[in-house]
Image (tube, rainbow, N blue to C red):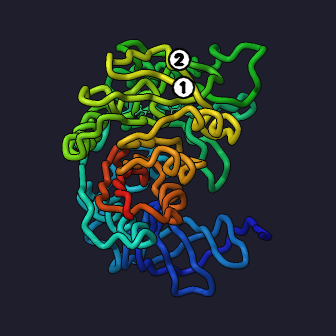
Amino acid sequence: MNEKNLQHTHQFQIDSIDPLGQGVCKNSDKITFIDKVLPDESGTAVTWKENSKVRFARMTSLESEKVSPLRIKPECSHYQDCFNCSYQHTSYDSELKFKKEAFLRMLRALQYQSTIDLIEAPERFYYRNRIQLHYDLHQMKLGFITPQTQSITEVPHCLLVRAELKQKLEELYSHQSWVQLISNQQPKTGHIELYYLDQNIQLNVNQPYAFGGFTQVNEVMNQRLKSYLLNFLEKFSPKTILDLFGGSGNLTNHYSKAKVTVVDGFQSTQAQLKDWQTFQKVDLYSKNECKNWLLATPKQDLLIVDPPRTGIKHLAEILEKTQARHFCYVSCNPSTMIRDVKELENYRCTHAALVDLFPATHHFESVTVFERIG
Ligand SMILES: C[S@@+](CC[C@H](N)C(=O)[O-])C[C@H]1O[C@@H](n2cnc3c(N)ncnc32)[C@H](O)[C@@H]1O
């Protein structure tokens, strides 16, 4: 697709909000996506990217009589320039409504006709136990990448980080002290992760995401996610469970009535498996490794899958071999979840939940439960 970077200005009127939290404007020569706007708002936007079919633009002014009654003043001082949050210009209730509508539209691909359970967060801010910031020594900047411009937005007062990380974050920015963390051997551009893990603050430079062992980013909501899953475990009473992309066994360490096999590509140094959990190290994205592992994998009553944003490969083969009666797909990217399950012939979706692990941003966790048919 031939993409152009243009800076021309045009009028817009917003029809709806898409799953990425962007306003969708259809009353133009091509569909236009604009962030930080609300339905029925109109005004002027400047294009930052377009191709033959769609345009991406940024609102520059709103018509005063068309400002949505849902609009509020964002709490974060970085909100206007920062791409990370998408919904601070409206209340948490309307954020949840937009997320729910977007998820319901996605679920139509599965012929799912029922309602969705909504598990909301008690706090909109101060929840992240981990924050990954990009640095660029040429620009002398540290922060989040803004895709519109590929530039870095500095976020010393980000409201998403947990109270324990707030001071450390501000210290990084104070007199650009983060620069001292980058040795001569490190590249001129890279990332720094602040990670509150086991009551310690780690500062990781150019290490893989969640270095030290994956934990869900929002601990309070992680507990609510586990409670929600527990309802199904109690209901289905499986005797055997495969916890795929299971990390340290987080999603099954509170259910002692089954023999659980936790499978992950990386063995966490934090892993504290319970007596009923055993760990298998398998690269679930490798066709060969997955095939060999499946050969030695017996039938299972239930599968839990919780892959990274890219989703799961070989799901049909895994279900075929394990013959699981039920499976629960926990996903931080519902669009890849839909892609992975929509062609499955022997399973139907019976429950869906939106678990708001990432308030103020457009992201959310989904839990979908499937039952074997036939
Ligand atoms: C979203 S996390 C879920 C972890 C866990 N279920 C939890 O609740 O903490 C995704 C997991 O996928 C694992 N992973 C990433 N790539 C993998 C691969 N190629 N094969 C197996 N596991 C992988 C990561 O190590 C991480 O533990």
Q: Earlier in the sequence, mark 1 or mark 2?
A: 1
Choose top left, top right, bottom left or bottom right for residue 14. bottom left
| Nearest to the observer: residue 357 or residue 151 | 357
The image position of residue 224, as x and y in percent, is: 24, 39
In the image, is residue 61 above or below residue 212? below
How crowded is the residue under tag 2: few (<14 C-alpha within 10 Å), some, or many (20+)?
some
Residue at 53% x, 57% y: name it. Answer: 340
Q: Secondary structure at mark 1?
A: strand
How crowded is the residue under tag 1: few (<14 C-alpha within 10 Å), some, or many (20+)?
many
The image position of residue 304, as x and y in percent, is: 40, 42
Q: What residue sits right under mark 2 in the picture?
A: 203
Q: Quadrant of the C terminus?
A: bottom left
Q: CA distance from mark 1 to mark 2?
A: 6 Å
Residues at circles 1 and 2 in contact by the CB criterion of under 8 Å: yes
Residue at 60% x, 33% y: name it. Answer: 293
- Say left or right for 231 vs 341: left
Residue type pointed to by label 1: Glu
In the image, is residue 197 above or below residue 348? above
Q: What residue sits right under mark 1 in the picture?
A: 193
